[in-house]
């Protein structure tokens, strides 16, 4: 079944999509999720709910269901690091019962990088295999083990790409696998280095992949010098240059300056051929998304 979600319909039109990320709270406060839903700007096509980013948080599925109840369309992130294929299939079917249609398939950072170093990782399947399993479930009505799923859930399958991984040939091989698996949309890691991103995008276009999957480029405001240095050191996202850190260091209001930087990057990204939308990685600072949208002229 083809997903009939707001995001799916927007991507069909070919018009640019606008999404933003949110972090489930680290606690059991329902009001906190509703407050977060209200803090996110209007006009978003979807809200991507992160799955235990950087530390253990409340259930992304529960958070996504609450957001849907608040009138926000969720994209549910699911990390394969923490679940075997039994749990993955069960979680997707359960989320579908709650009306969630959009799914982002991720392998996840190794747990030793901060989420929970004491935990054992599942890593039963990776994000490519997960995306293929979901696409097969939606299109053919069979589960991960080949048994019938009736009725088949309506799913829109998304994946993540890292534009800065080199060599480029290996980067494209993995991207081609994700597209072949059935991904309908692709969120990039945060873009800070526009030249490096443009090099990747040119290679993607040369391979014709931009015609097969909707590429949504991500930006991330870094609201403090400390946060910028942390992201720079982790290298999980795109490379953060010393010039960006210096600009934040000189700013009277680093948070406002980070919004300006992210907005300026987004404004350049939206004009690049092959980019089908902008995604704002909030890093838990959801209120900053509205400023980025305004700065970039995305409203």
Image (tube, rainbow, N blue to C red):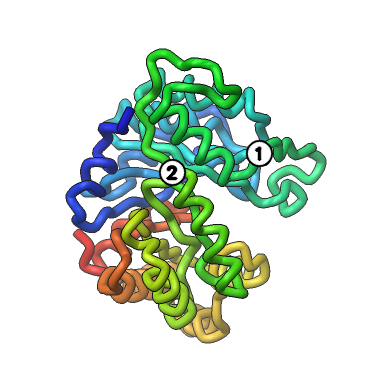
The number of numbered discs placed on residues in the rendered structure image is 2
The x, y position of residue 201, in whole percent, is 41, 72
**What residue is at 54 percent from the left and 30 percent from the top?**
59
Q: Looking at the image, which residue sits at the far top?
A: 150
Q: Is residue 121 above or below residue 217?
A: above
Does any portion of residue 20 appear in the rendered image?
A: yes
Task: Indicate the quadrant containing the N terminus: top left, top right, bottom left or bottom right.
Answer: top left
Q: Is residue 151 left or right of residue 267?
A: right
Regarding mark 2 in the picture, which secondary structure is present there? loop
Task: Indicate the quadrant containing the C terminus: top left, top right, bottom left or bottom right.
Answer: bottom left
Badge 2: how crowded within 10 Å, few (<14), some, or many (20+)?
Answer: many
The quadrant where residue 81 appears: top right
In front: 99, or 131?
Answer: 131
The x, y position of residue 225, in whole percent, is 56, 73
**What residue is at 71 percent from the left and 40 percent from the top?**
123
Residue wearing tag 2: 182
The x, y position of residue 289, in whole percent, is 35, 57
């Amino acid at each position: 079944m083809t997903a009939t979600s707001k995001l799916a319909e927007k991507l069909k039109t070919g018009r640019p999509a606008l999404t933003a990320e949110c972090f489930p709270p680290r606690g059991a406060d329902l009001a906190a999720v509703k407050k977060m839903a209200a803090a996110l700007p209007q006009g978003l096509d979807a809200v991507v709910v992160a799955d235990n980013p950087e530390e253990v948080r409340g259930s992304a599925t529960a958070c996504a269901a609450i957001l849907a109840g608040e009138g926000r369309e969720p994209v549910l992130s699911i990390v394969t690091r923490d679940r075997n294929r039994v749990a993955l299939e069960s979680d997707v079917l359960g989320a579908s019962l709650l009306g969630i249609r959009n799914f982002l398939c991720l392998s996840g950072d190794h747990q030793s990088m901060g989420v929970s170093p004491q935990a054992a990782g599942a890593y039963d399947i990776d994000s490519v295999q997960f995306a293929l399993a979901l696409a097969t479930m939606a299109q053919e009505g069979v589960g991960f083990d080949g048994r019938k799923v009736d009725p088949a859930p309506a799913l829109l399958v998304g994946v993540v790409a890292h534009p800065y991984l080199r060599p480029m040939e290996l980067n494209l091989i993995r991207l081609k696998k994700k597209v072949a698996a059935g991904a309908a949309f692709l969120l990039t890691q945060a873009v800070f280095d526009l030249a490096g991103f443009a090099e990747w995008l040119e290679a993607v276009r040369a391979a014709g992949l931009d015609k097969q999957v909707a590429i949504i480029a991500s930006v991330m405001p870094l609201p403090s010098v400390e946060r910028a240095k942390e992201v720079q050191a982790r290298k999980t996202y795109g490379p953060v240059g010393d010039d960006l850190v210096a600009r934040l260091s000189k700013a009277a209001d680093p948070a406002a300056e980070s919004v300006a930087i992210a907005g300026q990057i987004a404004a350049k990204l939206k004009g690049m051929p092959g980019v089908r939308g902008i995604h704002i990685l909030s890093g838990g600072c959801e209120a900053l998304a509205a400023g980025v949208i305004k700065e970039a002229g995305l409203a």
